Image (tube, coloured by chain):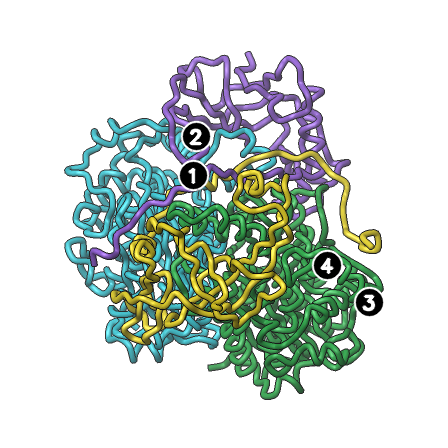
Chain colours: A green, B purple, C yellow, D cyan
Amino acid sequence: MMRRNVAIIGCGQTKHGRLRNVNTAEMISEAAWNAMEDAKVTPDEVDAIVVGNMQGFGGIYDTELWAGELFGAPKPFLRITTGGTTGGSVAHGGYYSVASGLHDVVLAVAWEKHSDSKERGATTGLAHVAMANMFHDLQQGASLKWLVSLVTGAAIGVSAFQASCYMYRSGCKVEHLDMVAAKDRRNAAKNEYAHLRWPNCTPEDIAKTEWVSYPLRFGHVCPASDGASAVVFAEEKIAKKKAERPAWIKSVAAYADEPNWLGENSQGTAITDLSEQLECIISAKEAYRRAGIKDPRKEIDMAEIYQPFPHQELMFSERLDLFDDGKAWIALEEGQTEIDGSMPLDPSGGVISTNAIGSSAMQRVLECALQIMGKAGKHQVPKDVKNAVAHGWGGSVNFTTVAVLGDSPRR
Amino acid sequence: MEKREVIKVTGLPIVAGFRWSVGKMMEKFIKSFADKKIIAAKCPKCGYTYVPPRSRCGKCYTKIEEKNLVELSGKGTLTGYTTAYVELDGKGIFLDLDNPKVIGAIKLDDSDSTIFMPLGEIDQKNVKEGIKVKVVWKEETKGEIADILYFKPAR
Amino acid sequence: MEEKQIKYKTEETIATEGEWPVGDYKYKAWKHHEEFKEGLKEKKIVGSICSGCGRVYVPPAYICGRCFRWMEERTIVSDRGIITSFVLSNPMKKGMKILGMDPVDMGIVADGEVLIPCMVKFDGSDSFVQTILLNVDPKDAKVGMRVQVVWAKEPKGQLSDIEGVEPIK
Amino acid sequence: MQRKIAIVGYAQTHHEADPPNTREGMVFEVAKGALDKAGITREAIDTVINVSSDYQDGRTISNLFLVMAEGAYLKDESKVEMDGAFGVLYAMMRILSGTHDTAMVVGVTQGSIFSPHQISFYTLDPTFDRQIGLLNDVAAAAIQARMYKNKYDVSDEQIAMVSVKNLVNATSNPYAHRRIPKPTVKKVLNSKLYYDPIRELNISPISDGACALILASEEKAKEITDAPVWVKGVGNCQDSYLRDRNLLKLESLETAAKKAYKMAGLKDPPTELDVAEVTERFSHEELMIYEALGLCKEGKGKILIETGVTERKGQTPVNPSGGALGADPVLATGLVRIVEAAKQIRGEAGKYQIQGVRQALAHGQTGLCAQSNIVFILGGER
């Protein structure tokens, strides 16, 4: 069958940070309107809207029922919500909406407003992922010491354990995590939409921050941001008419693994290495196959990786087949992953600098699109970006979204 | 098969709390309650008037700014209603009400939105679509949503 | 150092409040932990074994998603295994509040104690169990370390019967 | 549509108030059931769409724990957090794009663990309506029912007749939840009053339930089954928020239906549709649905119910399975409607089979007073 080509023709986002002068509806609509204006389309030209956020964080259920009119309702709406990968999944939904032939122009919007939660940071939402399990364990006579160890030791959830696994697997050291964090904070300083910006940040600066729980320091951890991002997808003819240099979606893939941490109500799962990330390996493989990419290391020019914690940038760059398993830290040491390196990773500063969870994986797609369209401004990578890969990660370390974007349609 | 029995798991008494920033338009709206005023946002293009105010017209997508805020009289027409014999307890249980409450759908004069507010000082028999109603404020208003007590028949 | 970081912030408007009573859900679960706890009473670690792929899940799981079938059989795995990952807490301090509790005051942990939450893969199982690494200097904690269960003196058939794990001497 | 798509397998649980089953158990039961029905194994599925709600399940990212039970291990997976029928739309998009050939959609809700009515309260504008604290899905529906009654002179008895029809139908559906012996108008009008004029038997029950459905592209469908049910048309639309919407009609449903009819090539839906399965959370809503679907003129829904047009023996039977008033596992309900419509086409509806069904409609909805609607047109012949 003939496949329909789909491109991103416009991107919009809010500044990220603590946005206490707008309500959620206004925040979402700002990003949506920025994207529509960038794409030079009006709501009347938009056929359908795909939305998503992580509902537990903002305390509102199906926010678009209330907020939809500010950016396009009445219209077909589709809500897609998959945890950390939500933004990536929403972008995939936007792609499929157009690729299906059911719609020609689709707006995809994703957001989070962490500051609406009374608890600090993202704890409300994150705790709720495990809440049902925790209640169950306590009812089954788990000790208070175990609970305290869970809450204090693993305050940042499963990621610290994952860092421990990854460091054992790859031989990388905490110093490498410091280097990743410093690089991303410097990149973020060039991105006016980023939440946490730290010009001239050095690994030594990061190393001076306190431990959250070893092996992760405060300097390694993402902030809890408010913000929204949006992109407009269009079919080939419209895309060519509306955009000078559209960012073509060559493929998307989002494979699910067994939950890596615990199963439903703390049943065992058959995974012991949190850094294996089989779902990412398969998603990447499928995405490259669908995009016609044979050698990602040669054909991919840059990547936006979902890395709320620095070991994840290294780990996922390997799972995305941009480096050998366990060897990304060597590329890091050689400066390959810098903004002017041979394989720039997260020139936007990534999730480690800006984490409005529901929007974060959408931001990766948006940032790749900006790089291809040449609209990334101060954090535009110096080399010509022909193909880019956008990654999202979430669930209980078992969901991955991958999108391959390019400067030309898939042949 | 008997192995697959099911138990119920109850939680700790934890409540997730939220505090939603209301944005500039809503802030004006709520704060003006202190002066016993109800304001609305009138679309500069199509004229549709939103109460509570919002920053973008849902009908023609025009941006609405603070200069487009208008003051309403606090009087309006009842366009629909229901008598509530139950109410949710916040945990999902419908509790019986000893004194049924009347909820009114009210279109305030010079506005196009419908707001859903309690009705008071009215006999249930007299609740009818089309009757005129007006806002009843707390004696001392502070600029918060609770300043509005209910709506009552206008005459 | 903090001052070098720029964090984006806006002025504040007023806020309205609301809640979500997450503690009021009445979840449903299998009795998998009942089976697990029965074993603990006799210092045994029970897992479920898939008749399709032979994987052993600890605590018992009911569905093997790989083979797409129920797991009816149960098996006992060793109480020895290896550390697959661990993290270190900051030293516990008096006055710390965790879920509204002061763990030092309550005698749950010692003042200055560093907790080592860890994941252990018991020999004969394909899962990890999250527990605490005990009786070891935090500096000596390592992934790959051989450990054994520290059992409660008198197991009562509850999850806390496994107090943690310690290095095998 | 750029590819033809068919329903090739399905399964649902027996919907109940509080069955001794877990979320995981229900999902596994229907996923396996749908595969068995289609006569294929998990390996034949390309992509899986989960339909569930974090608020309903009390777990953030609730779908992550269901990956294994729904057969999504190492599959291209996603989750739609609306009615299950929207999940089917997304699964269709994935097949239509040419990326996938087969898809499984699994929807699940356990009303027993937390009330969907409370969750409906969380959809309100948090800066105003949620603070006033009066509205929820039932209260909003009551205001709508009252407006509708007054505008079109509809009696409580006529509205109760919808409940009676669907509850009578539910008695012969083994999967239905609410089974009351010999439902009558009197029983409905004597049931507990919630928000006037809405009584207990005007409201859909709170159910635990799951439903799964397998879709396939034309080529795959023909390999899998001799009795594919083709998706001939689909349309969806979301209306404005409650405050700025005309509550007297379901405009977004009308838009959705028109789109679906056009795609399916229907010119005169009332005569061309042999049966409809719709999501009526409240009995008055079904009358409004008749109107929005174009089965009758505005305000004339009462005539269809009075004259028996939508009875099982009528010209256009609506909800022969008992509809949402018979069982409402919220996020799975629209999915169940599609399955019930497909069963009618395949002649597998048992005691409530309508004779000679060739074309059927299924409807799902999300939001207060049916704010977001989706319509499917299914057909048996090529």
Three-letter amino acid code at the position of disc 1: Asp
> Which element type, helix, strand or loop, lies under badge 2?
loop
Cα distance in 3D space between marks 2 and 4: 44 Å
Q: Please give the label number shown on residue C24.
A: 1
> Which element type, helix, strand or loop, lies under badge 3?
helix
Could you tell me which chain the residue with mark 3 belongs to?
Answer: A
Looking at the image, do the residues carrying marks 1 and 3 touch, with CB atoms under 8 Å apart? no
Looking at the image, do the residues carrying marks 2 and 4 touch, with CB atoms under 8 Å apart? no
Which residue is the site of mark 4? A219
Cα distance in 3D space between marks 3 and 2: 53 Å
Looking at the image, do the residues carrying marks 4 and 3 touch, with CB atoms under 8 Å apart? no
Crowdedness near tag 4: few (<14), some (14–19) or many (≥20) residues, C-alpha within 10 Å = many
Q: Please say whether residue D265 is visible from this viewpoint.
A: no
Image spot of residue A76 (x, y percent):
51, 55
Q: Please say whether residue D6 is visible from this viewpoint.
A: yes
Which one is in front, C70 or A135? A135
> Which element type, helix, strand or loop, lies under badge 4?
helix
Could you tell me which chain the residue with mark 1 belongs to?
Answer: C
Please state, as top left, top right, bottom left or bottom right, where the C terminus of chain D lies in the image: bottom left
Q: Please give the label number shown on residue B89.
A: 2
Same chain? Circles 1 and 4: no
